[in-house]
Image (spheres, helix red, strand yellow):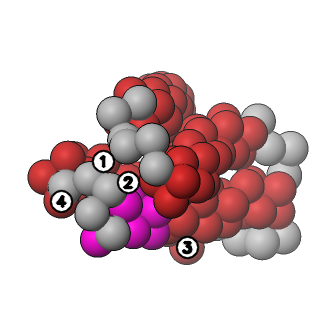
Amino acid sequence: MEESKQVDKEQFVERFRQRTKQLALEVIRFSKDLPKTEEATIMKRQLLRSATSVAANYRAACRARSSAEFYSKISIVIEEADETLFWLELLSESGSTTIAKVAELKKETTEILSVMAKARSNTTKK
């Protein structure tokens, strides 16, 4: 039974690693279609930084050497996912893109944020 739990956890971690990477790739693709205005360029740069940071820091969390390090990295993932949501909202509310174009990205980012918040709440800071 314990071995089964370990396999399930490893599968979850790998699927989530792919999921956060896929979010980063989708944001990269999305950003290519944004207008070339100064405002959109600034927001795009920030969006790209935060979305790619979600994937990079989740990957780092998977390699954590202690629960304290895991907690710290997951906290960064949460912060960056929330920031990604902010930039997506700002892009649509400023008229740089439409709500429809950011809907799927916002949905996926929100789901990642929820899962990571739950993971952090289940982790001790020791």
Q: Tell me the residue that label 2 is attached to.
A: 109
Q: x, y (%) of residue 78?
A: 56, 63
Mark 1 falls on what kind of element? Answer: helix
- Circles 1 and 4: CB distance less than 8 Å? no
Mark toward the viewer: 4 or 3: 4
Left or right: 77 in relation to 39: right
- Quarter of the image where one finds residue 91: bottom left
Q: Amino acid at mark 3?
A: Ser
Mark toward the viewer: 2 or 4: 4
Q: Which mark is residue 105?
A: 1
- The answer to which of marks 1 and 4 sits earlier in the sequence is 4
Instruction: State yes or no: residue 75 in magenta.
Output: no
Mark 3 falls on what kind of element? Answer: helix
- Circles 2 and 3: CB distance less than 8 Å? no
Q: Tell me the residue that label 3 is attached to.
A: 121
**In the displayed structure, would residue 96 be above or below residue 17?**
below
Instruction: State yes or no: residue 91 in magenta.
Output: yes
- The answer to which of marks 3 and 1 sits earlier in the sequence is 1
